[in-house]
C-alpha cells in the first residue's frame, strides 16, 4: 500500500470522505493537493474547506497545498493538476471524489439538474484525469480512483442523474484500465457508503452529519482508497467500502443462446428465457465468452 513520497490529487477533499482520504494518504507519506470548491451539497457557494484540511495535514507533519477550482470547469481541472506540478513536480495519484446532489424523481427533475450533476461527477472526473493522464503515461506510473456508487451500480429512487454519472464512472474505469495498463497506470472504482453531508441530504435520510454513527464514519472507507492508490493496486476493479466492510462488484454474463445469423426474428421470443437465465453466469471481460 506504499504511497510514501507520491503526489496525490484528491478532489472534493474539504470534508467527508475526501478529507479522510487526504488525511490517511498524507499520514502514509503522500504529498496532497486538497481540492475543494468549498460549496454546498447542491454545488452552490464557495468556501475555505480546502485550507482547513491542508492545515490539518501540515500540523501532523505532512505536506499539502490547497486548490479551490471546480472540477466541472475545464480550465479549473487543468489548474488542479497544474497545482500539483507547481507544488510537487508531478502527479502520481488522482482520487476523483468531488460530487454534488440534486435529487428528484426523473419526472420532476429539470435538465439543468441533470446536467450539473453529470458535469461535476462524470465530466469533472474525466477532466481532471485527462489533464493528469499524459504525466502518468510519460513516467509509466499512475493510480486513478473513480468514485462510483450503489446508486448507479444497483439503482436508487430519485437519483437518476447521480446514478447515471456513477455508473458512467464504471464505464470510464473499464476503458482506462485497458488503455493505461501498458504504462503502469491502474484505474479502479470505489463504491463507498458513509455518514456525510451528502448522504444526510438524501430525502428520508436519518443521518446527522455532525453526530454520525461511529460505525458509519467516512474514515472506515478510506483504507480502500489507500490500497487503490498504492503501488500494488489492482486494475479495473470495483471495491465497495462501508462501515468497515469491504467487498467487490463485477460484471457477470451468462452463456446465452446462439440462434445463428439466419435466425427468424420470432426465434428470439421463444429463446428469451434462456437468454435471460443467469444460472451459469460468470465474470465477463469480453463481448462473448
Image (tube, grey):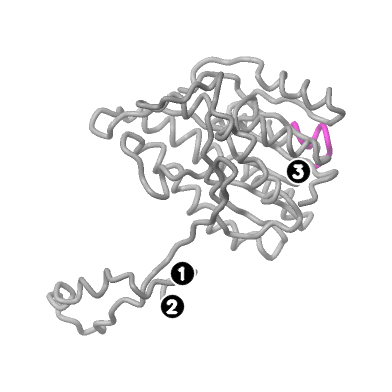
x and y, in percent, of residue 65 in the image: 77, 27
Q: Magenta stretch: residue 84 in it?
A: yes
Q: Given contact means CB atoms under 8 Å apart, are the residues at marks 2 and 1 in contact?
A: yes
Question: Which residue occupies the foreground of this view, 66 or 112?
Answer: 66
Q: Which residue is mark 2?
A: 289
Please name which of the two marks, 3 or 2, marks the residue nearer to the observer. Answer: 2
Identity of the residue drawn at 56% across and 47% down: 245
Q: Earlier in the sequence, mark 2 or mark 1?
A: 1
Q: Are marks 3 and 2 in contact (CB under 8 Å)?
A: no
Q: Which residue is mark 3?
A: 91
Would residue 22 be found to the left or right of residue 238 on screen?
A: right
Q: Residue furthest right?
A: 61
Which residue is located at x 66 percent, y 16 percent? 48
Q: Secondary structure at mark 3?
A: loop
Instruction: Tell me how far mark 3 sits from mark 2, CA to CA.
Output: 37 Å
Q: Name the residue at 73% across, 37% down.
A: 24
The quadrant of the rendering that contains the C terminus is: bottom left
Question: For the residue labelled by badge 2, is the local secondary structure a helix, a strand or a loop?
Answer: loop
**Compared to 261, does 50 lie above or below?**
above
Residue 58, position as x, y percentages in the image: 83, 25
Q: Which residue is mark 1?
A: 284
Q: Is residue 31 magenta?
A: no
In the figure, 191 relative to 79: above or below? below
- 125 left or right of 132 in image: left
**Horizontal and vertical percent for residue 282?**
44, 72
Task: Tell me which corner region of the image, top left, top right, bottom left or bottom right, holds residue 180.
Answer: bottom right
Residues shaded magenta: 83-90
Amino acid at each position: 500500500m506504499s504511497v510514501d513520497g507520491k503526489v496525490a490529487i484528491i478532489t472534493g477533499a474539504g470534508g467527508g470522505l475526501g478529507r479522510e482520504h487526504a488525511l490517511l494518504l498524507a499520514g502514509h507519506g503522500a504529498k496532497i493537493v486538497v481540492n475543494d470548491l468549498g460549496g454546498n451539497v447542491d454545488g452552490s457557494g464557495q468556501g475555505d474547506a480546502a485550507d482547513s484540511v491542508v492545515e490539518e495535514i501540515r500540523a501532523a507533519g505532512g505536506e499539502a497545498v490547497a486548490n479551490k477550482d471546480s472540477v466541472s470547469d475545464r480550465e479549473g481541472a487543468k489548474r488542479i493538476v497544474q497545482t500539483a506540478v507547481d507544488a510537487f513536480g508531478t502527479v502520481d495519484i488522482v482520487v476523483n471524489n468531488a460530487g454534488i446532489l440534486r435529487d428528484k424523481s426523473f419526472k420532476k427533475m429539470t435538465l439543468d439538474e441533470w446536467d450539473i450533476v453529470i458535469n461535476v461527477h462524470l465530466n469533472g472526473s474525466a477532466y481532471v484525469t485527462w489533464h493528469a493522464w499524459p504525466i502518468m503515461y510519460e513516467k509509466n506510473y499512475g493510480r486513478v480512483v473513480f468514485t462510483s456508487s450503489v446508486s448507479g451500480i444497483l439503482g436508487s429512487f430519485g437519483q437518476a442523474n447521480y446514478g447515471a454519472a456513477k455508473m458512467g464512472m464504471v464505464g470510464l474505469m473499464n476503458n482506462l484500465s485497458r488503455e493505461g495498463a501498458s504504462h503502469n497506470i491502474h484505474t479502479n472504482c470505489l463504491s463507498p457508503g458513509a455518514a456525510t453531508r451528502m448522504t444526510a441530504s438524501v430525502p428520508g435520510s436519518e443521518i446527522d452529519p455532525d453526530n454520525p454513527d461511529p460505525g458509519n464514519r467516512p474514515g472506515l472507507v478510506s483504507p480502500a482508497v489507500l490500497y487503490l492508490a498504492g503501488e500494488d493496486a489492482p486494475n479495473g476493479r470495483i471495491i465497495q467500502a462501508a462501515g468497515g466492510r469491504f467487498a467487490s462488484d463485477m460484471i457477470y454474463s451468462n452463456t446465452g443462446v446462439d440462434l445463428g445469423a439466419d435466425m427468424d426474428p420470432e426465434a428470439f421470443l421463444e429463446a428469451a428465457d434462456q437468454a435471460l437465465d443467469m444460472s451459469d453466469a460468470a465474470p465477463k471481460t469480453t463481448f462473448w465468452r
